[in-house]
Amino acid sequence: MSIHENLLGGPPPTHLPDDPGPREMLASGTAPVDVAAAHPTSSLAWAQLADEAFERGATVESYAYARTGYHRGLDALRRNGWKGHGPVPWEHEPNRGFLRALHALARAAQAIGEQEEYERCSQFLKDSSPEAAQVLG
């Protein structure tokens, strides 16, 4: 028996490949809008845009940015073997852009009164990564 064998019988965790470009650009102070323009498939850039919009009270804008990051993340997860459910570990840094976008989408949905979407996205985040749900609040 392998120490990495999934004894619960569920799908294995999905680990997105590392894409350091957007993360390094954001860390160096590049504006998230410029990072998203240079790396439009980066969930991390869209999640950062969503967070900044939410912080300044632009909830509809935050919702749109978060939805873009969420869908870009779903595309990446599917390309990497995810079958629509299963763990997306927060511990694996490349997964954090998707998880942050999912959190931002739930938050913005709640702020604009989309209760059903808020509940769906909140549960999806908890199911994907209990740690991300705890860390992101």
Image (tube, helix red, strand yellow):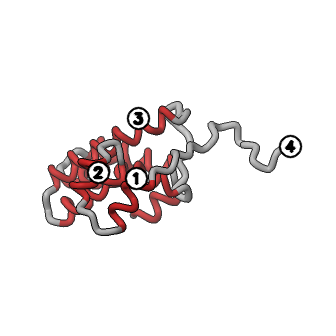
Name the side, left or right, on which 99 lies relative to 129: left
Q: Residue at x 86, y 43 (%)?
A: 1
Q: Position of residue 98 (x, y in %)?
A: 41, 48
Tell me the distance, in whole angstroms, between the alpha carbons under discs 1 and 3.
Answer: 13 Å
Mark 2 Cα shell of 10 Å, populated few (<14), some (14-19), many (≥20): many
Check disc 2 and give the amino acid type.
Trp
Residue where numbered disc 3 is placed:
75
Q: Residue at x 16, y 51 (%)?
A: 61
Tell me the distance, in whole angstroms, between the alpha carbons under discs 2 and 4.
Answer: 41 Å
Label 1 vs label 4, nearer the camera: 1
* Number of marks in the rendered image: 4
Whether residue 38 is situated above or below residue 82 in the rendered picture:
below
Residue where numbered disc 1 is placed:
97
Which numbered marker is on residue 46? 2
Check disc 4 and give the amino acid type.
Met
Tell me the distance, in whole angstroms, between the alpha carbons under discs 3 and 2.
Answer: 14 Å
Which numbered marker is on residue 1? 4
Task: Please say if the residues under marks 1 and 3 sit with CB atoms less than 8 Å apart.
Answer: no
Q: Residue at x 31, y 53 (%)?
A: 45
Q: Residue at x 27, y 50 (%)?
A: 36
Name the side, left or right, on which 75 lies relative to 65: right
If you read the primary sequence from the N terminus, does the residue marked by circle 3 or circle 2 appear first? 2
